[in-house]
Image: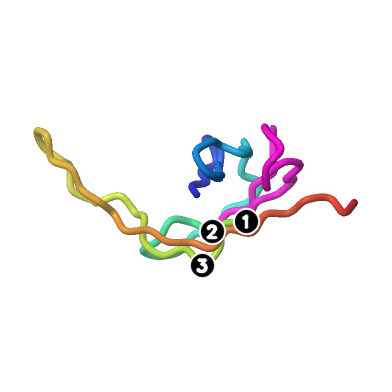
Amino acid sequence: MAARPRQPATVLDGNAFASAVNAAALASSPKTGAVPELLLKSTATRGTGVFADVSYVQRLNTHGGVAPTTACTGTDQISVPCSATYAFYKPAK
């Protein structure tokens, strides 16, 4: 599962994507040495899976994910460990 403010968050259901959420950041809380915690508001959802009708997403407890301060050269690639907890909210039915 991946969630980024400008890219859809998706869940893999078997071999097909069940649903997706596009969202825009409403609030950001900086964390030293980690990507910021975020509150995202859904701008669109697709599919009928677990993300159908999601209205808000929170990215919490972030660790790592910060880009290196030195520039890459040539074909250098660097993996940056990152973890977070995501909470998804839907309207009550």
Q: Quadrant of residue 33?
A: bottom left
Front residue of 20/75: it is 20
Q: Characterize the local packing of mark 2: few (<14), some (14-19) or many (20 or more) Cα atoms within 10 angstroms.
A: many
Viewer-nearest of discs 2 and 1: 1
Identify the magenta region. Answer: 38-57
Q: Characterize the local packing of mark 3: few (<14), some (14-19) or many (20 or more) Cα atoms within 10 angstroms.
A: some
Q: Quadrant of residue 55?
A: top right
Let me know if residue 77 is in the magenta part: no
Q: Are marks 2 and 1 in contact (CB under 8 Å)?
A: yes
Taking 42 as reference, is 75 left or right?
left
Viewer-nearest of discs 2 and 3: 3
Tell me if residue 41 comes above or below residue 33 in the rendering.
Answer: above
Q: Which mark is residue 61?
A: 3
User: What residue is pinned by disc 1?
Assistant: 58
Dot 2 falls on a residue whose secondary structure is strand
Q: Are marks 2 and 3 in contact (CB under 8 Å)?
A: yes
Residue at the image position 48 percent from the left and 61 percent from the top: 84
Residue at the image position 52 percent from the left and 46 percent from the top: 3
Taking 68 as reference, is 60 left or right?
right
Disc 3/disc 1 C-alpha distance (Å): 10 Å
Q: Position of residue 39 (x, y in %)?
A: 64, 53
Query: Which amino acid type is shown beneath numbered disc 2?
Result: Glu
Query: Which amino acid type is shown beneath numbered disc 1?
Result: Gln
Tell me if residue 6 comes above or below residue 31 in the rendering.
Answer: above
User: What residue is pinned by disc 2?
Assistant: 37
Q: Which mark is residue 42?
A: none
Dot 3 falls on a residue whose secondary structure is strand
Q: Which badge, 2 or 3, is on the more N-terminal residue?
A: 2
Let me know if residue 46 is in the magenta part: yes
Q: Position of residue 45 (x, y in %)?
A: 69, 35
